[in-house]
Image: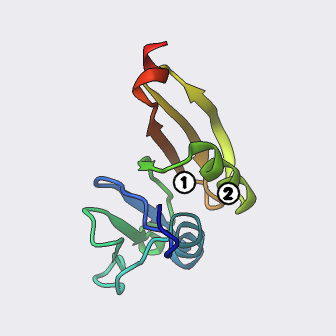
């Protein structure tokens, strides 16, 4: 374990669409330590941590919101608690299915997302 700054939490490809990209950027930046690229193109797309996903400004599309993605976190309960503290609501409470632990939340703009982690092998075998 290191005493340095927190690492960004990994996600595969995803998109977040919102008419308020600044608020979404502030929320996800604080929750997962994400870095956002410069806005570009007509929808002001911002790449997130150089991954295969990003944040879209949907104002020119009438302002819809969308997102469903899983973020791999070190401690699901701690991330859950922090998300709620930052203004998220609970869509699906913390679940342990024997192999993984996960929860679905909704950010302050209405976008659904999930946090998860594998259970230790000995916990999954029980």
- The secondary structure type at the circle numbered 2 is helix
In the foreground, 32 or 45: 32
x and y, in percent, of residue 47 in the image: 32, 74
User: Which numbered dot is residue 82?
Assistant: 2
x and y, in percent, of residue 59 in the image: 48, 73
Q: For the point 52% across and 74% down, which residue is it?
A: 25
Read off the residue under disc 1: 111
Q: For the point 27% across and 72% down, which residue is it?
A: 50
Q: Viewer-nearest of labels 2 and 1?
A: 2
Q: For the point 29% across and 53% down, which residue is it?
A: 12
Total residue callouts: 2
Q: Residues within 10 Å of mark 1 (few under 14, many from 20)?
A: some
In the displayed structure, 69 sits above or below 117; it is below
x and y, in percent, of residue 69 in the image: 41, 48
Nearest to N terminus: mark 2 or mark 1:
2
In the foreground, 20 or 95: 95
In the foreground, 4 or 67: 4
Give the left or right position of residue 94, taking residue 6 as reference. Answer: right
Give the left or right position of residue 23, taking residue 45 as reference. Answer: right
Q: For the point 53% across and 66% down, which residue is it?
A: 28
Give the left or right position of residue 47, taking residue 3 as reference. Answer: left
User: Which numbered dot is residue 84?
Assistant: none
């Amino acid at each position: 374990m290191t005493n340095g700054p927190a690492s960004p939490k990994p996600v595969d490809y995803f998109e977040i669409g919102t008419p308020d990209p600044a608020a979404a950027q502030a929320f996800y930046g604080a929750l997962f330590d994400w870095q956002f690229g410069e806005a570009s193109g007509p929808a002001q797309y911002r790449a997130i941590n150089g991954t295969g996903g990003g944040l879209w400004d949907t104002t020119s599309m009438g302002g819809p919101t969308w997102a469903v993605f899983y973020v791999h976190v070190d401690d699901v309960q701690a991330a859950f608690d922090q998300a709620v503290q930052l203004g998220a609501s609970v869509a699906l409470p913390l679940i342990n299915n024997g192999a993984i632990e996960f929860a679905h939340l909704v950010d302050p703009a209405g976008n659904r997302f999930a946090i998860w982690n594998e259970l230790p092998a000995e916990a999954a075998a029980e």
